[in-house]
Amino acid sequence: MADKLEQVYINFQKELAGIKDLKSLQDFEVKYLGRKGELTIILRSISDLSPEEKKKIGEKANTLKNEMAGIITAKKSELEMEKYKELGESEKIDITTPYPRRVGHVHPISKIRKELEELFKSMGFMILDGPGLESDWYNFEALNISEHHPARDSQDTFYIADDPEWLLRTHTSPVQIRAMQKYGAPLRAIVPGYVFRNEATDASHDHTFYQIEGLMVDENISIANLIAVMKELLKGVYSKDVDVRLRPGYFPFVEPGFELDMKCLICGGKGCSVCKHVGWLEILGCGLVHPHVLESGGIDPKKYQGFAFGMGLERIIMMRYGIDDIRYFRSGDLRFLEQF
C-alpha cells in the first residue's frame, strides 16, 4: 500500500509539470483528489488493512493528500497571475485618449428652491430650517390646532409608534413658532423643507413633498402686504403674469385665511389630471397670522400683525415645466432628471 502511495505521488509530480492552463489543472485535480480520484481510491481500501497498518498508511495518505492539495493551490495562483499578465499586455490603455464624461443635473426641486430663496432674500427674508421630527406642540398646538380639532384629521400624520407626542412634520409651519421665539418681531423668513403626509398618491399628491413656508411679522401688516408678496413670488417663478384668484379658505393658524389658485399652465385652464379637470390649481394657503399663533411665538398680537403662506414646491415646478405627475420627482428615473 505504501508503494502505491509513492507511485501516485511520482505520477502526480510528472503530470503537474505539463499543466499550462486552469482548465487542465481542474481536470488534473479531479483525477487525483476527486471522489473517484487515484488517491481517494487508495484511501477507501485502507479498511481492509490491520489496525496497525491502517493507522500508519492512513496518516501517510492524509499527509500526502494535504501536500498535493497545497501544490495544486499554488499552481492555480501561478496560472491566474500569468493570465492577468497576458491580459494586461494585450489590453494596454492609452491614458491620453479623451473620453466622454457624464455631467450630472441639478434636481428641479433644488433648482427652483434656489431661485425662490434668492427672490425672497432680495425682499429681506431670512432662509430658515427646522427638524423633520417634530413635537405635537410645535406641529399642532402652538399653531392653534388643538387635540380634537378637525383640521388634524386632514393632516394624515405619521406618528412615532413608541411616543405619539412626536411625529414627522406635516408642514413647515412649526418653524414659524421657532422663528418668533428666537428672533422676535419684526421678522421676515421663509422655511423650505420636506414634509410628510400619510395619504395615497396620485398625479398631484404624494406622501412626501417639498414645502416652502413664509412668514412676515411687523406693525400694521395687512392683506395688501400679503397680496404684494404673492404677486412677486409668482412673477419670479414664471417670469410672466399668471392668472390667479383668491378665495376664502380655512386654516386654524390664520384669520382670515385664503386659498391662492392659479390657472393651470398644463392645460391652459381647460382641465386635466393635474388640476383635477377644473382648470385651476391650488398653489398655496395663506392669510393673516392668528393672534394665538403670535402669542405662542412670544409676540404681542396687539402691537404686531403678520401674514403667512405655505405652498408645495412640486406644484410650482409642475406648472413651470409642464410636468403632469408629481411622482416623477422622487422616482429616481434618469430619463426625467436629465431633462433639467
Image (cartoon, rainbow, N blue to C red):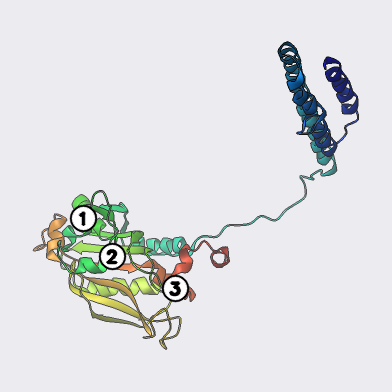
Q: Disc 1 residue type?
A: Asp
Residue indicated by mark 2: 156
Extreme residue toward the bottom, this view: 270
Q: Residues within 10 Å of mark 1 (few under 14, many from 20)?
A: many
Q: Nearer the viewer, residue 98 or 198?
A: 198
Q: Which residue is at a point 40% across and 73% down the rendered structure image?
A: 204
Q: For the point 14% across and 62% down, which residue is it?
A: 146
Q: Amino acid at mark 2?
A: Asp
Q: Is residue 128 left or right of residue 307?
A: right
State the residue in front, 164 or 113.
164
SS at mark 1? Answer: helix
Query: Could you say where residue 76 lies in the image, as x and y percent from the top left?
Result: 78, 31
Residue neighbourhood size for the residue with mark 2, other residues' Cα within 10 Å, grouped as few (<14), some (14–19), many (≥20): some
Picture coordinates of residue 279, whole percent (x, y): 38, 85
Q: Are marks 1 and 2 in contact (CB under 8 Å)?
A: no
Amino acid type at circle 3 is: Met
Label 3 residue SS: helix
Spatial separation of the CA atoms under disc 2 and disc 3: 23 Å
| N-term mark: 2 or 3 | 2
Mark 1 or 3: in front is 1
